[in-house]
Image: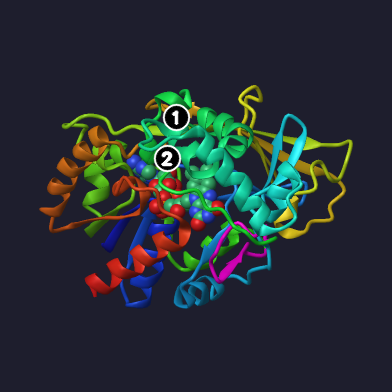
Amino acid sequence: MYDYLIVGAGLFGSVFAHEAKKRGKKCLVIDKRNHIGGNLYTEQIEGINVHKYGAHIFHTNDKEIWDYVNSFSEFNRYTNSPIANYQGEIYNLPFNMNTFHQLWGSVTPDAAKQKINEQKNKAGITSPKNLEEQAISLVGTDIYEKLIKGYTEKQWGRPATELPAFIIKRIPVRFTYDNNYFNDRYQGIPIGGYTAMIEKMLEGIDVRLNVDFFEHREELEALAGKLVFTGMIDQYYNYQFGVLNYRSLQFETRVIDETDNFQGNAVVNYTARETPFTRIIEHKHFEFGTQERTVITEEYPLEWEPNLEPYYPINDDKNNQMYRKYKELSDQETNVIFGGRLATYKYYDMHQVIGAALATIRNEF
Ligand code: FAD
């Protein structure tokens, strides 16, 4: 008999299992996939750790969480500095003095501010009615047209004029020559990949892969005193209030034989509407790899359907209201803990998932 049956060997399930074991509890972790790690999973191809479910860069401001992940793996000094490719023109991201110099030749912060203000004023938008108007009112027309419009439309599968303004609340603009995407104090990539880090967390814990909770529910529930569920909350309740919506992604991964360095950067965003993918990831650059070949992944956003992977929750009013009904049911459970991105219908970065799992543990013990 186990103390906890943990559904999902992703980050939430793995942190919970590790901490429960430390407190003398016996855990069984199951996952319907054939591997541990959930969306953090990295797989070695050509000696390169390939991020199978999209680029994952660890970043946090919280020293406790940074120390926590470093206790499972050493982290390298990778700094996320994505590049935008707009029809062959290259721009630095996030929007900073390098970008403004590339766009307009601006040399000083005042010159760049003046350019942005001129464009904002010329557009004359006072109460933005959609995402396009919102973006132009924040950063002007050039940045919007070249670096925001196409990328956002591909991400959401709809014209920017049909997307609500609230999707973009603010657009970070930096008037320094600083290409570091994150503002956090700590960031990096685990040396040896995320899978090795999760393996370390799950050391000494029973794990069963290729097991779907819903296919063996009764027999699995009978194995443990308590359930920790990190799958989809609507599925747990048999979709009784409806199906929660997501955006999905398709990843096309290729080994490139012709060169050992395809694009010179780990992440390149393709911001023109005509390019069908949103970004290309070149995985070796996350770990400063010097392998003979290189591996790239093109990322294509997709409408989600139940047979696809759910990636980004669509937190509009309709879905949020539906989620609240499921949440009310889950709040009444005494023997089930719901955690992680799918069970709470929330986009979480990794450090937030760890924070949430550690808070759940504090609550439980
Ligand atoms: P998951 O990793 O999804 O784990 C849940 C697990 O439960 C899965 O393995 C699933 O197979 C399993 N499961 C579900 N249902 C069942 C069932 N019925 N039976 C058995 N098993 C089941 N965060 C960052 O901090 N930095 C980044 O750069 C970053 N980039 C990202 C890029 C993309 C494209 C995406 C989608 C996310 C990114 N994230 C990033 C977020 C990060 O992926 C999440 O914070 C993290 O993976 C969430 O962990 P989790 O345990 O909640 O969920």
Left or right for 24, reference 64: left
Kindly identify the residue that appears in the image at 89 percent across and 36 percent down. 258
Kindly identify the residue that appears in the image at 59 percent across and 61 percent down. 196
* Residue 90 in sight from this viewpoint: yes
Provide the secondary structure element on which disc 2 rests.
strand
Q: Which residue is outermost to the left?
A: 332
Q: Position of residue 3 (x, y in %)?
A: 26, 65
Q: Give the residues drawn in magenta, as a range.
A: 178-191
Between 141 and 27, the one lying in front of the other is 141
**Residue 179 magenta-drawn?**
yes
Q: Main secondary structure of the magenta part?
A: loop
- Does residue 98 sit above or below 91 in this rendering? below
Left or right for 217, reference 138: left
Between 140 and 288, the one lying in front of the other is 140
**Residue 259 magenta-drawn?**
no
Q: Position of residue 192 (x, y in %)?
A: 67, 62
- Does residue 115 sit above or below 132 in this rendering? below
Q: On residue 312, which mark appears?
A: 2
Give the residue at mark 1. Answer: 308
